[in-house]
Image: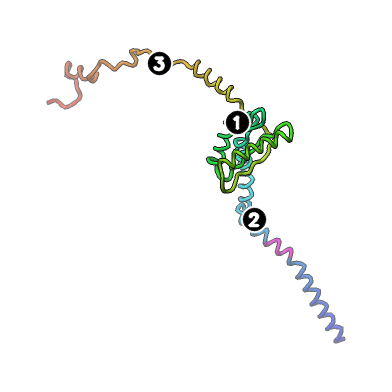
């Protein structure tokens, strides 16, 4: 009988510890949920802010890629770099922010044309930066939305030709200063003696 009670006590002791151990994950999760609910929305603000800012970062990167792309118009028929292309490369390697000094080259219709374009860009960059790290030169399939310099010159000259010469409008009576130099009620006060001020 005594052994039976002892074994029953030992068995209940182990079974109760298992029950307590089984409750710990639930208690731990409920305490985490309690702390999270009390601190809401603080833990989630960083994720929300990141999701709001992320599209702008993508737009910024796309804008710099478009700006730093050497399109087909900046290469000659032999796929060598034109003077305008060299000036654009000079701007990229000297004026662009250091994190965005990447040169994108529009690919040609064949691999040989693309290789010739990249080689002429590498030559121009190495002449501008003889020592130190060189900017990345990447190939892109996206043509930047630009037009030729000849077309832009024609548009600019046509705009200058059609702009009327500036001239002032006619001088009208509305713009003339008033001929009356004294207050309107000053004549009445002097003539009729009806001024409301103190008499001398």
Magenta residues, start to end: 25-31
Between 30 and 147, the one nearer to me in the picture? 147
Name the secondary structure under disc 2: helix
Q: Which residue is mark 3?
A: 167
Is 30 a magenta residue? yes
Location of residue 138 (image quadrant): top right
Q: Which residue lies most toward the bottom here?
A: 2
Question: Which of the two discs, 1 and 2, labels the residue nearer the N terminus?
Answer: 2
Name the secondary structure under disc 1: loop
Q: CA distance from mark 1 to mark 2?
A: 63 Å
| Residue 195: percent from left, percent from top | 19, 22
Q: CA distance from mark 3 to mark 2?
A: 69 Å
Q: Nearer the viewer, mark 1 or mark 3?
A: 1
Q: CA distance from mark 1 to mark 3?
A: 42 Å
Between 157 and 164, the one nearer to me in the picture? 157
Question: Which of the two discs, 1 and 3, labels the residue nearer the N terminus?
Answer: 1
Placement of the N terminus among the 4 image quadrants: bottom right
Q: Which mark is residue 37?
A: 2
| Residue 22: percent from left, percent from top | 77, 67
Asked whether the beta carbons under mark 1 and mark 2 sit within 8 Å of each other, the answer is no
Name the secondary structure under disc 3: loop
Q: Which mark is residue 186?
A: none
Question: Which of the two discs, 3 and 2, labels the residue nearer the N terminus?
Answer: 2
| Crowd around label 2: few <14 · some 14–19 · many ≥20 (10 Å) | few
| Crowd around label 3: few <14 · some 14–19 · many ≥20 (10 Å) | few
Q: Which residue is mark 1?
A: 82
Q: Nearer the viewer, mark 3 or mark 2?
A: 3
């Amino acid at each position: 009988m005594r052994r039976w009670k002892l074994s029953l006590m030992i068995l209940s002791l182990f079974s109760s510890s298992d029950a307590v151990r089984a409750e710990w994950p639930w208690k731990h999760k409920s305490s985490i949920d309690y702390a999270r609910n009390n601190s809401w929305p603080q833990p989630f603000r960083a994720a929300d802010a990141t999701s709001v800012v992320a599209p702008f970062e993508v737009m910024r990167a796309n804008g710099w890629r478009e700006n730093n792309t050497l399109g087909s118009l900046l290469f000659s028929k032999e796929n060598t770099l034109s003077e305008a292309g060299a000036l654009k490369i000079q701007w990229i390697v000297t004026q662009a922010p250091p994190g965005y000094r990447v040169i994108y080259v529009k690919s040609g219709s064949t691999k040989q044309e693309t290789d010739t374009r990249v080689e002429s860009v590498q030559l121009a960059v190495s002449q501008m930066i003889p020592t130190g790290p060189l900017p990345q030169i990447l190939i892109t399939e996206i043509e930047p939305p630009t037009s030729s310099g000849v077309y832009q010159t024609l548009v600019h000259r046509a705009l200058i030709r059609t702009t009327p010469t500036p001239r002032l409008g006619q001088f009208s009576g509305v713009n003339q200063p008033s001929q009356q130099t004294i207050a309107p009620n000053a004549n009445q006060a002097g003539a009729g003696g009806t001024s409301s001020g103190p008499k001398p």
